Image (spheres, rainbow, N blue to C red):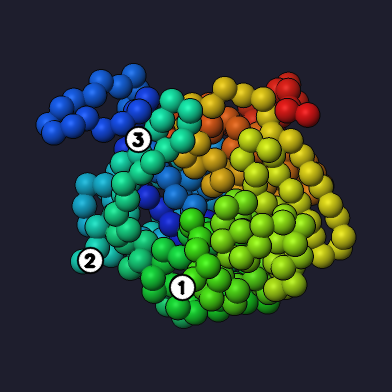
């Protein structure tokens, strides 16, 4: 296989500033301490972190024929991410966000959906997309054309070809369950946040949520719990609960996406589920220590060192 990791779905251009406690009235100005640009999104941020960890990475998605799209593609090239399957979608803008990061790390955002809803994988492109050991789909709920059955077809074919499959969603609501459910039977690892999982299932008890998702056919659920760590349950009966790393949070934008790439890194290295979770958490925690997706993530060596030397919130 050509690629270790293919990240398909939601790629976005982010402009972030910190700290922002509120927007000024009228035509006023607020001075901030930091400003950054980043590739983000459930597929974009994951692709960058996986590449920083040394995996050979392919990005699959869409950008618009605009300056933001040009920047996203150029920035991916900086990380040696293959962009042959990143489509320039005429009639669409690049999916873009303005992120106003609060002093506590929360990140209210203004978002334009854009080309994530416009790209589409044709039948004759399956071989290229699935020339990979791990297929990640991130951003279900935003991929207007792909969400209408094509994601399910690609996942089914990925499993037939022996790929490892991982899945994430975007800020799910109860209405998104009809989009997500057809994907779960061919998903090895589903990695929603607690808010997304509760919205999809209509449940509030975490054990009940995990059972609900496993009953849909997914191989394993790794539910991120923010400052409370992560909960992992799988069809073999494994139960793993890990606390979060003790860090000073700057910005939580992209933390779940970096978690996904860290988990895939562990899979690539042949690590146990617990080690995969710890690498995922270390990737997410480093992300939270800087402004913009993947800001502090530098390399696999640095992530493993962080994992071994940083205290956890037991």
User: Which disc is residue 90 wearing?
Assistant: 2
Q: Which residue is mark 1?
A: 147
Q: Between marks 3 and 2, how big is the CA–CA gap?
A: 29 Å
Q: Quadrant of residue 38?
A: top left
Q: Between marks 2 and 1, how big is the CA–CA gap?
A: 19 Å
Q: Between marks 1 and 3, how big is the CA–CA gap?
A: 29 Å
Residue at 73 percent of width and 27 percent of height = 312
Check the image and name the residue furthest to the left.
27
Q: Earlier in the sequence, mark 3 or mark 2?
A: 2
Quarter of the rendering occupied by the N terminus: bottom right
Residue 53 visible within the image: no
Q: Which residue is mark 3?
A: 100
- The label nearer to you, 2 versus 1, is 1
- The label nearer to you, 3 versus 2, is 3
Q: Earlier in the sequence, mark 1 or mark 3?
A: 3
Q: Quadrant of residue 221?
A: bottom right
Say few, some or many: other residues with alpha carbon within 10 Å of mark 3 (under 14 / 14 to 19 / 20 or more): many
């Amino acid at each position: 296989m050509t690629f270790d990791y293919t990240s398909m779905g939601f790629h976005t251009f982010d402009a972030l500033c910190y700290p922002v406690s509120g927007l000024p009235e009228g035509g006023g100005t607020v001075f901030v301490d930091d400003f950054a640009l980043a590739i983000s999104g459930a597929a974009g941020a994951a692709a960058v972190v996986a590449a920083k960890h040394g995996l050979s990475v392919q990005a699959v998605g869409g950008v618009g024929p605009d300056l933001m799209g040009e920047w996203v593609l150029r920035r991916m090239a900086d990380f040696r991410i293959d962009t042959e399957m990143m489509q320039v979608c005429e009639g669409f803008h690049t999916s873009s966000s303005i992120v106003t990061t609060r002093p506590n790390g929360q990140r209210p955002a203004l978002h334009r959906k854009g080309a994530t809803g416009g790209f589409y994988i044709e039948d004759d492109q399956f071989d290229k997309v699935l020339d990979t050991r791990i297929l990640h789909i991130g951003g279900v709920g935003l991929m207007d054309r792909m969400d209408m059955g094509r994601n399910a077809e690609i996942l089914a074919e990925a499993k037939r070809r022996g790929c490892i499959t991982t899945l994430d969603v975007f800020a799910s609501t109860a209405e998104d369950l009809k989009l997500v459910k057809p994907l779960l039977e061919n998903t090895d690892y589903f990695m929603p946040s607690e808010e997304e999982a509760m919205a999809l299932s209509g449940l509030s008890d975490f054990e009940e949520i995990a059972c609900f998702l496993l009953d849909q056919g997914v191989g394993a659920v790794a539910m991120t719990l923010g400052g409370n760590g992560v909960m992992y349950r799988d069809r073999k009966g494994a139960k793993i609960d890990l606390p979060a790393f003790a860090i000073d949070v700057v910005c939580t934008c992209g933390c779940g996406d970096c978690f996904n790439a860290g988990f895939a890194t562990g899979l690539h290295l042949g690590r146990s589920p617990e080690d995969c979770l710890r690498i995922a958490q270390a990737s997410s925690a480093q992300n939270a220590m800087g402004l913009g997706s993947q800001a502090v993530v530098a390399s696999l060596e640095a992530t493993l060192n962080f994992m071994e030397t940083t205290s956890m919130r037991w």
